[in-house]
Image (cartoon, rainbow, N blue to C red):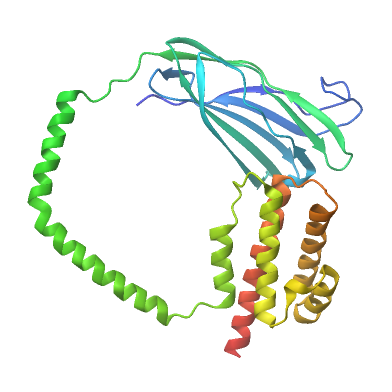
């Protein structure tokens, strides 16, 4: 196994007024790390390149523009992915981290390079546009790792066929056992009636995805889902109500904490849908989490009412 090591090419970005940025006079606390997971990569394996932004505070403090595909030498892009997370520092203060990971296939043995990446972002408090630039990273492409030979593959194929012939009777009885078990499980599931909140929690996880390329469409679906829940739970035609009238009805149905959360959700959703305001990935996560939390709180509340 190739020993993996992380090499951080760190661009210092605790930005004072004299830093190398697109505008001046703004102090930010945002750090950029770019690194590969191994400096020596076999030709038949992948180069994994990470771009990581970190700052103190929650995710909404900065709006990160889309990070484009970095320019490379002796590499070809296979794919990429991104993630967000919020942790805490030693003092217990929130720390937000956004990471974008790129996967490249080497072309030839020798040196390969990932050029510096420019990241543009906006300070949501001051609405200042800033940018950061990472350093160039070099990777050594070494001899490919040995792959299983044809003889070994053929031997394993014969072993597999022999095992299959021997196991056919066992597989047949195992299949019948699994079918019986599936029928019994289905019957048991029918006996356990799903609550309204549990059903909408399941639909939320199955239909609303963070990987959507159009966050505004996903927000519309999210709004329809939670509105449909309230309509079914409290038996009123919520879909035909304006946001103002809907909130008036919900004010009488929900506790203060839940109502405030939904008031913020609907008002923000209207600004995005009708006023054309931008929707960032981090804000969509926040609105999604609001709906998820409200459904859980509603589930707990109605469960306590039924027990009483």
The residue sitting at the front extreme is 240
Image quarter of the N terminus: top left
Who is closer to the viewer here, 114 or 7?
114
Judge whether residue 92 can be spotted in this image: no
Q: Is residue 78 left or right of residue 137?
A: left
Q: How many marks?
A: 0
Residue 285 locus on image (x, y percent): 67, 52
The residue sitting at the right extreme is 25
The residue sitting at the top extreme is 110
Image quarter of the C terminus: bottom right
Residue 142 locus on image (x, y percent): 40, 13
Residue at left 11%, top 36%? Answer: 158
Q: Quadrant of residue 219?
A: bottom right
Relative to residue 52, is residue 261 depicted above or below? below
Residue 296 locus on image (x, y percent): 62, 70
Q: Is residue 130 left or right of residue 283?
A: right
Q: Quadrant of residue 117?
A: top right
Relative to residue 27, is residue 232 depicted above or below? below
Relative to residue 292, is residue 85 depicted above or below? above
Q: Quadrant of residue 13?
A: top right
Residue at left 18%, top 24%? Answer: 150
Residue at left 85%, top 26%? Answer: 16
Residue 234 locus on image (x, y percent): 69, 82
Who is closer to the viewer here, 172 or 119?
172
Relative to residue 250, is residue 25 depicted above or below? above
Judge whether residue 55 can be spotted in this image: yes
């Amino acid at each position: 196994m190739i020993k993996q090591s992380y090499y951080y090419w760190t661009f210092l970005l605790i930005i004072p007024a004299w830093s190398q940025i697109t505008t001046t006079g703004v102090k930010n606390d945002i750090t950029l790390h770019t690194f590969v997971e191994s400096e020596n990569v076999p030709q038949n394996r992948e180069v994994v390149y990470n771009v990581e932004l970190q700052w103190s505070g929650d995710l909404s403090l900065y709006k990160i523009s889309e990070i484009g595909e970095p320019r490379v030498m002796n590499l070809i892009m296979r794919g990429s992915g991104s993630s967000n997370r919020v942790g805490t520092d030693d003092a217990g203060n929130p720390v937000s981290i956004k990471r974008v990971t790129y996967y490249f296939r080497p072309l030839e043995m020798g040196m390969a390079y990932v050029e510096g990446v420019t990241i543009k972002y906006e300070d949501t408090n001051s609405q200042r546009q800033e940018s950061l630039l990472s350093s160039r990273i070099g990777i050594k492409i070494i001899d490919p790792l040995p792959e299983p030979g044809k003889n070994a593959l053929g031997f394993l194929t014969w072993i597999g066929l022999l095992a299959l012939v021997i196991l056919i009777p066992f597989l047949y009885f195992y299949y019948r056992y699994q079918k019986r078990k599936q029928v019994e499980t289905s019957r048991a599931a029918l006996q356990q009636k799903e609550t309204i909140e549990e059903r909408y929690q399941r639909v939320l996880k199955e239909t609303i995805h963070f990987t959507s390329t159009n966050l505004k469409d996903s927000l519309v679906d999210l709004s329809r889902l939670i509105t449909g829940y309230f309509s079914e739970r409290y038996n009123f035609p919520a879909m035909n109500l304006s946001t103002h009238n809907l909130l008036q009805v919900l004010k009488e149905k929900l506790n203060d904490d839940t109502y405030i959360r939904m008031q913020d959700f609907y008002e923000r959703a209207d600004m995005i849908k009708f006023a054309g305001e931008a929707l960032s990935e981090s804000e969509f996560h926040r609105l999604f989490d609001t709906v998820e939390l409200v459904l859980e709180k509603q589930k707990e509340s109605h469960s306590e009412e039924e027990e009483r």
